Every structure is written in structure tokens, then in C-alpha cells.
Amino acid sequence: MPKPFDVEVEIRVEPDRLWRAVTDPQEVAQWFGWDAETLADEIQFIFVDHPVIDGERMRMASEEMGQYTEVAQSGANSVIRAVQSGDEPEDGEFDGMKAGWIAFFHQLKRYVEEHDGETRRTIFLRGTGNAASVAAAVGQRLPGDVWFTDDHTRVIATPDFGPGLGALNTVPPLDADESGDTNFTLTTFGLSDSEFAALAEQWLAWWETVAGDAELVTGAA
């Protein structure tokens, strides 16, 4: 059974604009997940075929999973929220689904606030490593403001690459002197094919010094 969670991010746009970004598959592709061959199919399943969509309430729900996503007014801004129901209390262990929504909603924030209508490109890196060491290395390499941090996830809004966004997840806590699975997503905008290819090569070379079993996942140029 999935663990319960409540993920919420405030975004500086009107609710109608945010709801379009959540329900139009072409726009979802600019913030959900990362570039991969399976992304279009995942978006079709999660955002089109599977949910019950209530446009008036700006809510989409998966009754099977006990999960819903909604957009609401928040003062002059909007808030997007993903809620997973369940009876088990949070225990501090890594929850990949929760970590995913945290990263994706901040990617959505960067997209609609700074890059409305633009096309993103992502560098997705995964591997294994000492959580505290990986977190420190990311902090040293990527300049910017920390938009979010908890035990397992850190999101950095960088002025570089667009401006872009970095999202780090570690299965052990970020400050733990403990090794485990980790991944990092760098969201970029406005790069040419050659610039993006060079950037991906540079980040992979760096990641190989930080994590074992290092792997790079990117979409087509």
C-alpha cells in the first residue's frame, strides 16, 4: 500500500493558468518527470486515461490509488497539491512517489513562472553514493537558492541553464553518512543541441566522480 503524503507548492500564476499546465499533455511534458522514451506514455496514463477529472473543482483523482491532485487559489497566487491517503503514519523512510511529486511540482513552478510556452531539456543522473557527500557535492557544483529541502529531497533554483532547476533525491537521509541509491535531475531551458550535449557530457563526467554505477538518462535532441 502506498504511504500517505501531502505535497503542496505555491506558484505565482492564476489557478486557470496552472490548471491548463496540469491537464494539457504537451505542457505536462515540460515539467513532469524527466526526458525519457516512456514519458509520453506515462503522461497519457497518469494525466489523461487514468484519472477522474473535475474541471470545475480543478481536481484529478485516482480512486484506485486513493490519490488526487488539485489546483486552488492562494491569495494572489495558486497552489498545487498532491494527496495520497492511507492509514500508516509517516515514518521518515524514503518515499519515491512523494519525492517525485516534490521535484515535479517545483519543475512546474519554474516552467510556468519563468518559461511559459518554452521547451525544457533535462539531464537525469542516477547511481549510488554516500548521501551526505553527494548532497555536499551538488551544493558546491550548482549555484542557486534552495527552494525546498527535507530528509531526502533538495530542490535548487539556479540562475544558470535558463534559469534552471536541480532536484536531488537520496534514499538515505541527505545528511547521513550512509550509502544508497540517489538521483539528480537538472532542468534546462534555451540550450541548443550542441550546448545541451556538451552540458550532459560534463555533468555525467562529474557524476561519475560522485556516485557509483553512474548513469545518464536524457531524451532525444
Image (spheres, rainbow, N blue to C red):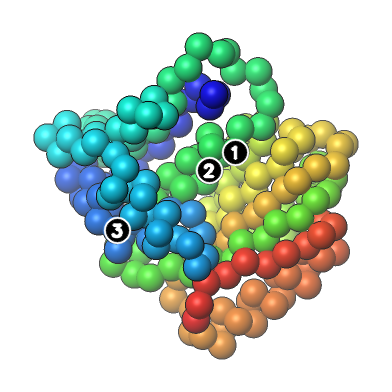
Residue 165, horizontal then vertical, whole percent: 53, 57
Dots 3 and 2: beta carbons under 8 Å?
no
| Alpha carbon distance from label 1 to label 3 | 23 Å
Amino acid type, label 1: Gly
Dots 1 and 3: beta carbons under 8 Å?
no
User: Residue at the spot x=15%, y=39% of the render?
Assistant: 55
Residue 36, horizontal then vertical, whole percent: 52, 65
Amino acid type, label 3: Pro
Name the element at disc 2: helix
Relative to residue 130, is residue 57 depicted above or below?
A: above
Neighbour tally class for label 1: few under 14, some 14-19, many 20 plus, Cα within 10 Å: some
The residue labelled by disc 1 is 96
Name the element at disc 3: helix
Say whether disc 3 or disc 2 marks the residue closer to the N-terminus. Answer: 3
Residue 5, horizontal then vertical, whole percent: 49, 25
Neighbour tally class for label 3: few under 14, some 14-19, many 20 plus, Cα within 10 Å: some
| Alpha carbon distance from label 3 to label 2 | 18 Å
The residue labelled by disc 2 is 100
